[in-house]
Image (cartoon, rainbow, N blue to C red):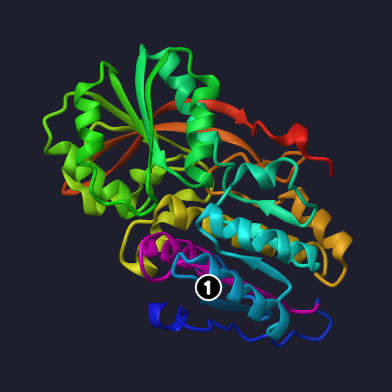
Amino acid sequence: MKLKSLMAAVCLSALATAGAAEGLKVGMITTLSGGGAGLGIDVRDGFMLAINQSGRDDVEVVIEDDQRKPELAVQAADKLIQAENVDVMTGIIWSNLALAVAPAAVAQGKFYLSPNAGPSQLAGKGCHPNYFNVSWQNDAFNEAAAMWANDNGVEKVFLMAPNYPAGQDMIAGFKRFFEGEVTEEVYTKLGQTDYAAEIAQMRASDADTIYFFLPGGMGISFMKQFAGSGVDKTVMGPAFSFDQGILGAIGEAALGVKNTAHWSKDLDVPGNAEFVSSFQEAYGRLPSLYAAQGYDTALLLLSAMEKADVSDTDAFRAALKEADFQSVRGKFSFGSNNHPVQDILMREVVKEGDVVTNRIVGVAATDHTDAYFGDCNM
């Protein structure tokens, strides 16, 4: 598979065979340039790998780059809905962009399958029957991390995240379950790259653990600066700052860090080893959490297509709700608000040969669901 063949408007032939269900058109808006582009590229590549492996010739995927800018995401959504007339939308990485696009898309009768962003607003009062989150609700990894911290002697934490919806959700999730003391709670600018002031605060803090969420390049910048600072404190966080693509840039500065995730390349469940191998063969790199989420999102979509035509909205919605596919993370089902019920793992950053990567060290939470389903009135 050539990466070039997946770029620009990626189209798989929409010709349906005689007697088969109608084809389906997917609009993918994701981040392919600018800050955080690696996350969007991984979601796209994981999604397209599953579509191509399916052998179906009745799925068309049109891909737009949001450049991590809400206004561009909204413009792309308008184009996909009004000009392209897509049936299903997916792809957004960032919670602020998801909030700008997903509610309007489902209000216009489209299905939205989130392969990453999980803002609390869309899990609670803003839930919708046509919105399905295939990744996690933002708080989840952090709630599980707090449970792990409680069981493993963490007493005082310094919390840090960017000041945008996902950052606020992440910190709220950790605080919801942590039984120790939060010594400081710091919010940075989204996209910030200089953390000298925050590291000085950490040095002066009596916290024993630094817990942070800084996705993409923010996490890379922080960990490199922190590793060279001489601050001797344990570091924890959700997987978003310690996933495979991020670790390739951070390197050994991340060794020993504990991080929560619903997936890992060494997870022993049906189909995962094959996914890791096929992704590596197709793209020449190890898959990340984001790639696994993109892959699962496509598997969910394909499973629904086997049971119903997208033109029958109620039947297609019911088929999505069944989640009748083998997730590469193992157990997966949807709760009452169309958000995942799943296990969350604790991983540790290690070195395997010359590669810095993650390995599973335990289960942080079993059959975990989000905290907002009670506010959803579907």
User: Which quadrant of the view contains residue 152?
Assistant: top left
Q: Residue at x 16, y 37 (%)?
A: 227
Query: The C terminus lies in which quarter of the figure?
Result: top right
Say which element carries label 1.
helix
Q: Which residues are magenta?
A: 22-48
Residue nearer the viewer, 163 or 299? 163
- Compared with 374, 34 (above or below) is below
Residue 264, image x and y in percent? 42, 43
Query: The N terminus lies in which quarter of the figure?
Result: bottom left
Amino acid beneath label 1: Leu
Residue 369, image x and y in percent? 65, 33
Residue 20, image x and y in percent? 80, 78
Does the magenta segment cover residue 26?
A: yes
**Residue 116 visible:** no
Mark 1 Cα shell of 10 Å, populated few (<14), some (14-19), many (≥20): some
Tag count: 1
140 left or right of 37? right
User: Which quadrant of the view contains residue 332?
Assistant: top right
Residue nearer the viewer, 185 or 104? 185
Residue 103, image x and y in percent? 71, 59
Does the magenta segment cover residue 39?
A: yes
- Compared with 376, 145 (above or below) is above
Q: Residue at x 64, y 34 (%)?
A: 370
Q: Residue at x 41, y 62 (%)?
A: 279
Q: Residue at x 29, y 18 (%)?
A: 207
- Which residue in the protein does label 1 denote? 72
Residue nearer the viewer, 69 or 50? 69
